Image (cartoon, rainbow, N blue to C red):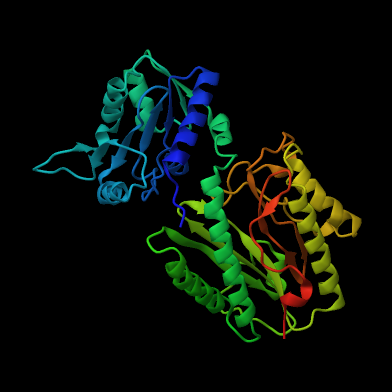
Amino acid sequence: MTFLSHAVRDSRLGAMRQLMERLRFDALIFTAADFFQYATNFHVDVQPWERPIMVVVPRDGKPRAIMNELSTHHMMMARERGHVWLDEIEFYAEHPKVAERQYLLPQLPEIATELLKKAGLSASRIGVDGTPGFLARAAAALPDMKLVPCLGDMRSLRWVKHPEEIEVMRQASALSDWVQERYRENIRPGRLVQELDYQMASLMVEEGAKRFPGANLEVMRCWTLSGPASASPHGDGASCGARISKGDVLVNIVIPRLNGIVIENERTWFAGAPSADQRKFYEVARAANEAATGAAVTGKAVSSIDAAAQHVIEKAGCSQYIRHRTGHGMGILGHEYPDDMAFNHRALLKDEVYSAEPGIYVYGLGGFRLDDTVVVGEQPEILTKSPRNIENQIIN
């Protein structure tokens, strides 16, 4: 099993410091959970709006963080495993204590002020992903310090994946392929759709325990839409009690998150022999998916992935059935940066990772979508390898 090592830490620190050099920053401050994880490799276990967090990454020096006491033991365990990249942490308490007193939530501005002083940043120019209230009040107490919003530039840090991240994605993809085969074995008319999904999630957990003991495996989604409901990309909002019917087209998605990295794997299935229309729409969706993955080539425009899929769908006379862009970045988040694929015309970079999920949605009939996780390269690498040929997708 590949965990993210200090080689990934060093790579990310290098990217952050290059950004600081380019934008003339003395430090970066992250307060969002996903960016905190990017900088520290700690899987954030609180909601920052409720229990604020902060990590300061100086251009010179070690990162320092402020965290809620709820995370104390989680952090100790992560350190013991060697999986976290953070040494200096100031914890604040949820409530007053008689012994072993700590700072309290209302004192967060004071904690942040003192941390920035200790780091030698009280008169510095610092890039931030946002300015929550406690940080704004700390800045007011340090009038010589300047906070500069730079969320867009920070997002670019996460485009290109380290080889270790891609290896984790390969392993998560292989697990998702295994789950898709279990779907193939278990789809049948009359079965409750939600019950099917929960069984598949349970099987994923059992298989994951065999493959990745001690890892952080989360089942982000095992989700199926069956029949006319699949014509809505995110369902019809009435899934409770829905059953698979003979003749249904089904769209499912399998999303594991392994050691903080997410992949997607989505397929279309048929409960019985597909009709002529179902077969036609499936083949268009399959061809669009293959065109999209084939366009994930270093140097081409990000938008070329979407354009390749759209061209196939339009040429087949199905453009009226498109309801969303072809995909998005993959990584720490399920919908990772960049998320503006259709309108982003910069050149693709080697080892970016995208979902390729063009879809066709025919109201009253169903949806037709295949989704693969693909690594950008001179030859794109498709990580999810579940079959796409229509005969494999027919459940008799």
In the image, what residue occupies the spot 63% across and 87% down? 190
Instruction: Determine which quarter of the picture holds residue 378.
Output: top right
Q: Nearer the viewer, residue 300 or 361?
A: 300
- Return the residue found at the far left: 99
Residue at image coords 57%, 71%: 179
Looking at the image, residue 388 sits to the left or right of residue 284; the answer is: left
Q: Front-most of 329 and 48?
A: 329
Q: Is residue 35 visible?
A: no
Q: Position of residue 214 (x, y in %)?
A: 37, 61
* Residue 186 occupies quadrant: bottom right
Q: Quadrant of the C terminus?
A: bottom right
Q: Residue at x 90, y 60 (%)?
A: 316
287 or 92: nearer the viewer: 287
Q: Residue at x 67, y 67 (%)?
A: 386
Using residue 312 as the reference point, say whether residue 30 is left or right of it: left
Task: Say if 261 sits above or below 7 in the image.
Answer: below
Residue 314 appears at what percent x and percent y?
A: 87, 54
Q: Where residue 150 appears, x then y in whole percent?
A: 53, 27
Task: Indicate the position of residue 305 as horizontal and vertical percent values.
Answer: 75, 47
Q: Does 331 appear above or below 218?
A: above
- Can residue 256 be seen here? yes
* In the image: residue 74, left or right of residue 349: left
The residue closer to the viewer here, 21 or 23, is: 21
Q: How many marks?
A: 0
